[in-house]
Image (cartoon, rainbow, N blue to C red):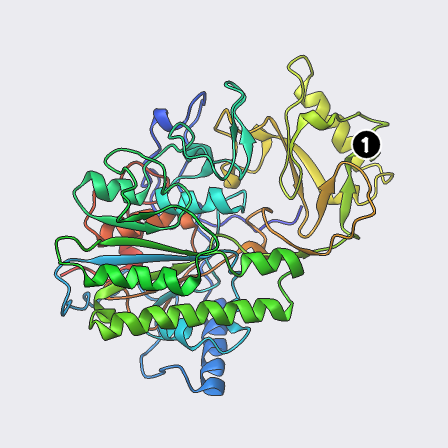
Amino acid sequence: MAAAAAAAPPFAAGDSPPPTALLLPRTTTTAGAAPAPRRSSASSRLHLLLTAALAVATSYLLLILPRTPLSAAPAPAAAARAQVKLEKPVVILISSDGFRFGYQHKAATPHIHRLIGNGTSAATGLIPVFPTLTFPNHYSIATGLYPSSHGIINNYFPDPISGDYFTMSSHEPKWWLGQPLWVTAADQGIQAATYFWPGSEVKKGSWDCPDKYCRHYNGSVPFEERVDAILGYFDLPSDEMPQFLTLYFEDPDHQGHQVGPDDPAITEAVVRIDEMIGRLIAGLEERGVFEDVNVILVGDHGMVGTCDKKLVFLDELAPWIKLEEDWVLSMTPLLAIRPPDDMSLPDVVAKMNEGLGSGKVENGEYLRMYLKEDLPSRLHYADSYRIPPIIGLPEEGYKVEMKRSDKNECGGAHGYDNAFFSMRTIFIAHGPRFEGGRVVPSFENVEIYNVIASILNLEPAPNNGSSSFPDTILLPSE
């Protein structure tokens, strides 16, 4: 299995507060601090050159601001820019689902590059949590917790104790552990507003998903309407205006699944997202508040192309072990298996790996099976009773099926090991707390919770991010 080499963490040991025992039912260990990526000045220079080249070609970028090299001190010396019109700090957190790092260079995206050129961005993208799926990652961004801590371990999964089944329409609080940002804000007397975000419809703490500030998910709502609704909050009286807002777009994930990451349809979807960012910027500028608002644009994961030639069929393991369909709780790209209680789990894993490595199973060498406790620790995917006991990790772009079929399967997928660069997404931030033209080393998305809590002067709930991380990315407040 190809994997990124481990890097030395930039934070002191113990700097990251462990999640509470309440967030880890039936566990024996606590999740550690988020592993930090290597600092690479070369990748930063490449990023800057690509950005500059696109600017010259499109004449859209502002190149008058200096760039900060990755070797610079973690905390910038400059102070936060003073707010002109807004009395309180405001954050708009925007998700473009499936926006793979690099998509921003597929076409002229002047509005996204305006944020990059005058804000702070991650050098080689934002690192998602494992599994690199939509619901686990959106909730990790919102809570600062790994899926093993916040409980949303997949897009769909059963609870092995109750037998209840989680789907993307499940809004019962029992599924959603931890404390998302809108709850942190509400519990501390700060108004929040969510225009779609996984978990935002769940009633927790002081957050009861009020009609005025909480939109129930409806994928048919035009993107323009979503942007205009967010802008409308800035027309409210100061004491009613939210300080924390979320905004969600399904694209370009929708197109990526259909055609993969390299089709012209992806370019069109990225251009449309850029247009929506432009619409938001224009609306904030009309109200005279754009420079006062901290806009954070992220994705939840990347995308990789898949096709029929990259398939592993589980029924070909029958000479070693016959897998029943009801054992397989998740197929691809995350293979999750829960055999009957009377079976030896190590024996199941050993027999599967023996078959996969025999040379007699098509593409078997591209799938590796693990007891969950033996998964690489960097994945943080063991300490929850909800996680099935046996996990299979396919290589990049490979998919797993029970048996052969006649259907054609060329498109795109995500959910793979987060060490794969294709799973990376974007982090782009602009506003009074972010230095213009600054590029920072890539980091895991569990750090975002503490960054936003710091901007809004909130006391963060226990999380897996580092308490010192905000100091490495934010301008000091006044």
What residue does disc 1 label?
A: 317
Frontmost residue, 97 versus 137: 97
Q: Is 439 left or right of 187, judged from the image as shown?
A: right
Query: Residue 74: which quarter of the image?
Result: bottom left
Circle 1 Cα neighbour tier, 10 Å, few/some/many (<14 / 14–19 / ≥20): many
Can residue 42 be seen here? The reply is no
Q: Is 352 left or right of 267, judged from the image as shown?
A: right
Q: Going 81% across and 32% down the picture, which residue do you hit?
A: 317
Query: Residue 207: which quarter of the image?
Result: top left
Query: Residue 142: which quarter of the image?
Result: top left
Q: Position of residue 19 (x, y in %)?
A: 35, 32
Frontmost residue, 256 versus 447: 256
Query: Residue placed farthest to the top in the image?
Result: 342
Q: Position of residue 138 (x, y in %)?
A: 43, 47
Relative to 170, say whether 263 is above or below. below
Relative to 438, say whether 219 is above or below. above
Count of labels shown?
1
Q: Secondary structure at mark 1?
A: helix
- Quadrant in the picture for the C terminus: bottom left
Q: Amino acid at mark 1?
A: Leu
- Quadrant in the picture for the N terminus: top right
Q: Is 6 left or right of 462, judged from the image as shown?
A: right
Relative to 9, say whether 170 is above or below. above
Q: Position of residue 247 (x, y in %)?
A: 37, 56
Q: Position of residue 8 (x, y in %)?
A: 45, 49
Can residue 63 be seen here? The reply is yes
